[in-house]
């Protein structure tokens, strides 16, 4: 036989073996992925690694005085995302130099050491009346509360009641330290001046 024929035959056999090896490797790889041992599967579930019932958290200011208090029916910390979730949280500002504000909601969540707490479901902010200002209440379904700045913001519809006055709108920023309230859009209502003489 012609030597070239043997060369071509050897080349064809080599290519065939390589293709068979590649196909076999791919097949085994697919099988291995389907039958990985349970212990080798990476856990992507964010599970609670700590929880508490009827919890009370207190934060102090630089002078060691109580500045902020949070309580909740239940608190759960989730390891993977490093978030803490609250059931029926109540947040109270304790700075004696500012009006006391209480914020309640059905659910809450904070991330790591952030001073931001996300509140959802029947969010209600109450500030009692003073000698010069009537009591105020703000209701919405979602809010972000920054406890270190005593600021609450939302981009959802809000209802603000201040004494006999009522204001509705969408989007709001409430700053307890500056004693300001801003409604971003669609503001409607009746605002009655009730400033009292000290």
Image: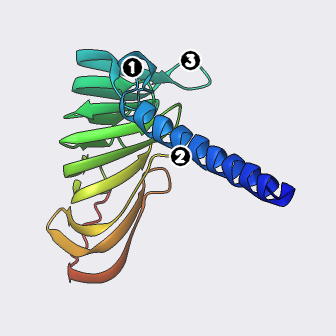
Residue 138: percent from the left, percent from the top? 24, 58
Q: Which quadrant of the structure image shows residue 45?
A: top left
Q: Residue 189 placed where, x, y %?
A: 19, 80
Residue at left offset 30%, top offset 24%: 76
Residue receiving disc 3: 64
Q: Is residue 26 left or right of residue 153?
A: right
Could you say which is closer to the camera, residue 30 or residue 53?
Answer: 30
Q: Between residues 107 and 3, which one lies in front from this camera angle?
A: 3
Separation of marks 2 and 1 at Cα, in angstroms: 23 Å
Q: 135 or 35: nearer the eye?
A: 35
Colouring used for the render: rainbow
Q: Which residue is mark 2?
A: 23
Residue appearing at x 52%, y 39% in the figure: 24
Taking the spot 84% from the left edge, 59% from the top edge, the residue there is 4
Numbered disc 2: secondary structure? helix
Front-most of 172 and 15?
A: 15
Q: Which residue is mark 1?
A: 37
> Residue 82 in the image: x percent, y percent?
46, 29
Q: Nearer the viewer, mark 2 or mark 1?
A: 2
> Could you say whether the residue bearing mark 3 is in a helix, strand or loop?
loop
Instruction: Judge whether residue 7 can be spotted in this image.
Output: yes
Label whose residue precedes the other's in the sequence (2 or 3): 2
Q: Nearer the viewer, mark 1 or mark 3?
A: 1
């Amino acid at each position: 036989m012609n030597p070239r024929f043997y060369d071509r035959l050897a080349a064809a056999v080599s290519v065939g073996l390589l293709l068979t090896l590649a196909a076999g490797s791919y097949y085994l790889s697919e099988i291995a992925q389907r039958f990985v041992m349970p212990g080798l599967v990476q856990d992507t579930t964010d599970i609670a690694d700590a929880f508490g019932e009827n919890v009370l958290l207190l934060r102090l200011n630089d002078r060691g005085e109580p500045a902020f208090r949070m309580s909740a029916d239940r608190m759960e910390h989730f390891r993977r995302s490093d978030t803490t979730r609250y059931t029926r949280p109540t947040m109270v500002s304790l700075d004696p130099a500012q009006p006391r504000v209480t914020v309640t909601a059905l659910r809450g969540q904070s991330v790591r050491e952030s001073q931001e707490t996300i509140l959802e479901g029947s969010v209600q902010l109450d500030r009692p009346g003073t000698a010069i200002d009537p009591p105020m209440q703000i209701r919405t379904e979602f809010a972000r509360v920054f406890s270190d700045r005593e600021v609450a913001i939302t981009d959802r519809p809000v209802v603000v009641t201040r004494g006999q006055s009522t204001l509705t709108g969408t989007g709001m920023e409430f700053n307890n330290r500056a004693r300001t309230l801003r409604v971003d859009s669609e503001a409607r209502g009746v605002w009655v001046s009730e400033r009292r003489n000290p």
